[in-house]
Amino acid sequence: MTPVATTRSATGMPTGRLAVWWLIASEIVIFGGLLAAYIMHRLAHDAWSEQAAHTNTWIGAFNALVLLSSSLSAVLGHKAADEGDGKKAAKMLYLTILGGVVFLAVKAFEWTSEIQAGYTITSNTFWSFYYSAAGLHALHVLAGVIVMGIVAAAAKKNENLHRVELIGLYWHFVDIVWIFLFPLLYIAK
Amino acid sequence: MAESVPATHDEHHEQSFLIKYLWSTDHKIIGMQYLFTGMFMALIGGFFAYAFRMQLAFPGTDIPGWGLVTPPDYNALVTNHGTIMIFWVAMPVLVAALGNFLIPLMIGCDDMVFPRLNRLSFQVFFLSTVVLLSSFFVPGGAFGGAWTAYPPLSAQAAYNLTPWGAPLWVLAVALEFVAFLMGGINFITTTMNSRAPGMKMHDIPLVVWMIVLASIIFMLSVGPLVAGAVMLFFDQVLGTGFYDPARGGDPVLWQHLFWFFGHPEVYVVLLPAMGVVIEIITVFARKKFFGYTPVLYTTFAAGVISFTVWAHHQFIAGIDPRMAHIFTVTTLLISVPIALIVFCSIATLYGGAIRFTTPMLWALAFIFEFLLGGVTGIYLGAAGADIYFHDSYFVLAHFHYTFFPIGIIATFAALTYWFPKMFGRHLNETLGKIHFVGTIIPFNVIFIPLFILGLAGQHRRIYNFELFPDLAKPEFQDLRVLATVALLIMLIFQVVFLYNFFSSMIRGRKAEKNPYEANTLEWTAESPPPHGNWSELPSVYRGPYEYSVPGRKADFWPQNEPT
C-alpha cells in the first residue's frame, strides 16, 4: 500500500526524481571528498607519476567509451518509457546492463594483471587511492546493474515505468564520476 | 481539498506484535524505535561517564558496577561515552526520532514518502548499534583513541592495542552514517513534496524546517568522512598508508575530513534542538514567534557558514597560521546567526502570558545554558586563546555546555512536550519539575568546576592525576570530587524521569487531542494518532504561530481552521 504522502507533489517534481537528485547530491560529496584528498596528495608527491605511468590508459579509455555508450541506451530507454513502450524500455535497459557488465569484466581483467605485476593496494599510496576510488566506483556500477535489472524486469510488464528515468539519472551520475576518475588516475602521468 | 486516507490502513490493526512494533513502516513506530534505542544508549553512555569520573575523583579504587578502571578501560570508556552520546543518543533522538514522529504529523500527511526506506534506515541503525556494543567483547577490548579517532593512533593496532575494537568502531560509525543518509533523504523529500494542501513555505513549523535543514547539512558534510572512514578502515585492516606520512600519506588529512563533518554536525543536532525550543516557547508564552522569516533565513546562513569553520579544531595541529586567521573570523561570524535565533526566542517571551510547565522550564533552561556554552566558544574560536586552552578541561566544559543543552535539555523539553501526543497520556508535572531541578543544578555543579580546572591548565586526557604532583593538589582534587558527586546526584535523579515516563505511559491522565491549545497540525490528530494519522487529512490556512491574535476570542488559531 502506498501512503497519500507518496502521491503528493508540492514542488511539482515527482517524489522519486526528487529523491534520486538528493541521493546524487550525497554521492557527489562522498566522491568529492575522496578525489579532493587524492588531488591534494598527488600535488604534494611528484614521485607518484612514476607509479601512475604503470596504469593502462587504453584500457581506461575503452572503459570510458563503453560506459558513455551505455548511457545512450539508458536515454533511449527513458524515451521509450515516456511513450509507454515498456518492452522497448526494458530492451534498452538490458543493453545498458550489458555495457555495465563489459565495464566490470574489463576492470577485473585489468586489476588481475596489475596485481600479478605487483601493484597492489598496499604497494604505494598512489595505488591505494587508485584501487579505493576505482573500487568504490565499480561498486556503484555493480549496484546500478543490479537495480537496473530489477527495473527492467518490471518495465517489461509495463509496471513502474517512471523508474526507468530514475535509474537512468543514477547511471549518468556513475558515468560522470568515471569522467573524473579516468583523467585523474590514468591520463595524469 | 482534504484527501481521505485509503481504507487499506485498517488492515494493519490486526498485525501481530512483532510486525506492528518491529517490522512497521509507520513513521510514528519507527520514531519510537529510534527513541527507545537512543534512551537505552543514553543509559550506557551515562554509565560510562560515571565509571571514568569515579576514577578521576577516586583514582585506583574499585568502582561499584565496573571494578578497577584500568588505563585501557579508561580510554575505551571516554571514547565510547563521546561516540555514544553524539552518534547514538543526540542524532537518533533529536534528528531521527523527532523527525520521524513530527514531520508527517506537523505537515499534515499520513506517513513518510518512502516508508520501507524508513524502516531500512532504522534497521541499519540498529545493526550499527549492535556492532558498536559488540566491540566491548572482542580481544583487546573497545577502541580507546578518542571519539575523534585521530591517526596514527586509530590507524595502527601497534599503537591503539585494539586490533578488533578500532575497525569495529569505524564500521559502526560508517553504518550509522548510511542509516541517517537514508533517513535524511526521506525527511527532505517528504517535507518538500507532501505538505498539506495550502501549507506554503512560511507555514511550515520551524522545528520541521530545522530538522530538514539539519538533514541537508548532514548529507552535504558527511560524504568526505564516509570516504575518510573507508580509508581509515583500509589503513587498519589492509595496511594501506593513507594516514601514514612515512608512506606518502598524511594524518592531518583525517582531521580535515573529520572536522569538515564534525563541525557542521554541531549544527545538525543544534538546529532541531532550537526548533523544539521555538515550538515550546511560542505555545507557553501564548505569543506569535518573534521573527519567523529572519530566523529561517539566518538558519540558512548558519548552515552555509558551518561549512567554513572546521579548522578551528586544528589550531595546534600545525596548520598555516594565515589559515588560522581565516578560520578565527568565520568561527566568530557564525555566532551572529545563532545569537539572532536566541534573541528572537527571548523576544518572544517579552509580554507573553507565560505558563511555567515542565517543557517550558526545559526550553528556558536550554536558552540560558546554551548561551553559556556559546559564549565560552568565543574564547576557543580565537586562535590565540585556543592555543592555551586547547585539550584542557576548559574545552571539555565548553563542549558539554553546548551538547548537554542540545542532547539532554532539549530532548527532555521535546519528550515532556510531545509525550501526550506520543502516548495519549500526561506525564506527572510534579515529578517532572523535581527531575528538572535535579538535573539542571547538578549539571552546572559538574561543569563549572571543570571550567576552573581548565583555566588552571589541566589537560583533559589524564587517567590518574596522582601521577602528576602539580595537578594532584587538594584544591584541584576537591573540584574533581565535587564534579563527580554532582554527576552521581544527576544520574540518581534520572530514575525519577524513567519512573515518570514509564508509569505515565500506563497510568497517566488521559490526554485529549490538543491539551496545550496549540496551533500546529499534530494537535488536530488523535492522541496517540492511529496508523494514517487522520481519517481525513487536514488542509492549512495560516502560519503555525498565530497566538493571541487581536480581535479573536480564543488565544490560539489552529493552522487547519478555515478562515
Image (tube, coloured by chain):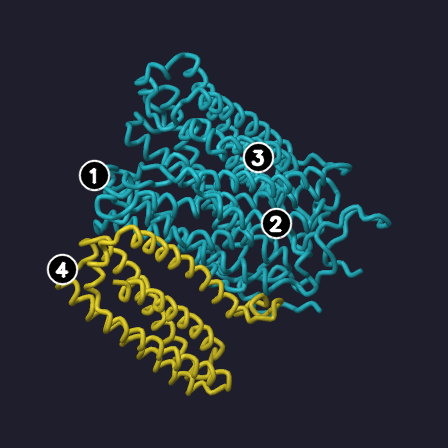
Query: Is residue B507 visible in the rendered structure shown here?
Result: no
Give the label, 2 or 1, closer to the camera.
Answer: 1
Query: For the residue labelled by badge 2, is the local secondary structure a helix, a strand or a loop?
Result: helix
- Above or below residue B280? Residue A185 is below
Residue B378: x, y in percent? 53, 33
Residue B505: x, y in percent? 57, 43
Residue identified by numbered label 2: B207
Chain letter tied to cyan: B
Q: Quadrant of the C terminus of chain A?
A: bottom left
Residue identified by numbered label 1: B158
Residue identified by numbered label 4: A118
Mark 3 belongs to chain: B
Mark 1 belongs to chain: B
Residue lying at 67% horizontally and 36% vertically, measured from the top left? B357
Give the label, 4 or 3, closer to the camera.
Answer: 4
Q: CA distance from mark 4 to mark 1?
A: 26 Å
Q: CA distance from mark 3 to mark 2?
A: 18 Å
Residue B219: x, y in percent? 47, 55
Q: Along the line of sight, which residue is nearer the eye, B414 or B365?
A: B365
Residue A44: x, y in percent? 29, 50
Q: Residue furthest top?
A: B474
Q: Along the line of sight, which residue is nearer the eye, B165 or B61?
A: B165
Amino acid under disc 1: Ala
Give the label, 2 or 4, closer to the camera.
Answer: 4
Residue lying at 34% horizontally and 66% vertically, measured from the top left? A140
Residue B41, image quadrant: top left
Q: CA distance from mark 2 to mark 1?
A: 46 Å
Q: CA distance from mark 2 to mark 4?
A: 56 Å
> How many marks overall?
4
Residue identified by numbered label 3: B370
Chain letter tied to yellow: A
